[in-house]
Amino acid sequence: MYIHGMRKRIWLIIIVACILVLAGLRFLSPEDTRICDGNTLVKHGNPSADGSGFFCFSGRRFAQTILPIQTITMNISTDFTDKGLIPFQYTCDGEGRFPILTIDDIPTDTKSLALIVDDPDAPAGVRDHLLLANIPLPETGDVIISQDTFDQWILGQNSWWEQAWWAPCPPSGTHRYVFKLYALSEKLDISSGFSKERLIELMWGKIVAQSQLVGLYKRQ
């Protein structure tokens, strides 16, 4: 009888410990779950949620979230200024279309461009609104990035599990929407539906220039 009671208490302790561990991991990662694919951390749910790779080792761990700063910059122009207000027609209060971006001052050794648009002020952590890869360069003239040309390039998966532009729609306050542009020395071997982490990993060592444009928005 004593041994049987001890076994029950041991099992109870194990079950409680498992519950606490799972609850702790959920607290550390409120918006996603993580699995390992080889030595690469793969995220599901919110691909941009902060994570340090508890469950697998990757020699390029920091490459998933951080890129080296490139001092050569390009020019991004649209119909709002850097750190200016985003016109409502590009948000959930309007048509929600992606603003037309014109890119110039691109280095001559650039083979493709990549674009990340995210919101670092989202309550649950950084939210990815658009991921684009392998944007080609025309033989002459500037690069034009618009919603009408998305289907010509490779779209990644945003934080709402869609391969699309998700218009700004902050729940409260003024949010920053950061348009990050990268000029790359080659095209990337990447498939549609990629995550930001995968894009950043593949861009390592290939960035020849970069630039960013910050737009602000608060709900009407």
Image (cartoon, rainbow, N blue to C red):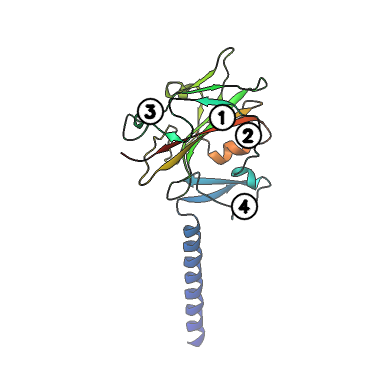
Residue sitting nearer the eye, 196 or 73: 73
Q: Examine the rendered structure and indicate whether residue 101 appears above or below residue 118.
A: above
Task: Report the side of 117 relative to 62 (left or right).
Answer: left
Q: Do the CB atoms of the residues marked 4 and 1 lie less than 8 Å apart?
A: no
Q: Which residue is mark 2?
A: 203
Gap in angstroms between the C-alphas marked 1 and 2:
9 Å
Q: Is residue 201 left or right of residue 46?
A: right
Q: Earlier in the sequence, mark 2 or mark 4?
A: 4
Q: Is residue 39 visible?
A: no
Q: Position of residue 141 (x, y in %)?
A: 56, 14
Mark 4 / mark 3, whichever is N-terminal: 4
Tell me where residue 54 appears, x and y as whole percent: 59, 55
Residue drawn at x 49%, y 62% as measured from the top left: 22
Of badges 2 and 3, nearer the viewer stands 3
The residue mark sitting in front, 4 or 3, is 3
Q: Which disc is residue 97 wearing?
A: 3
| Three-letter residue code for mark 2 | Met
Q: How many marks?
A: 4
Which residue in the structure is indicated by mark 1?
Answer: 114
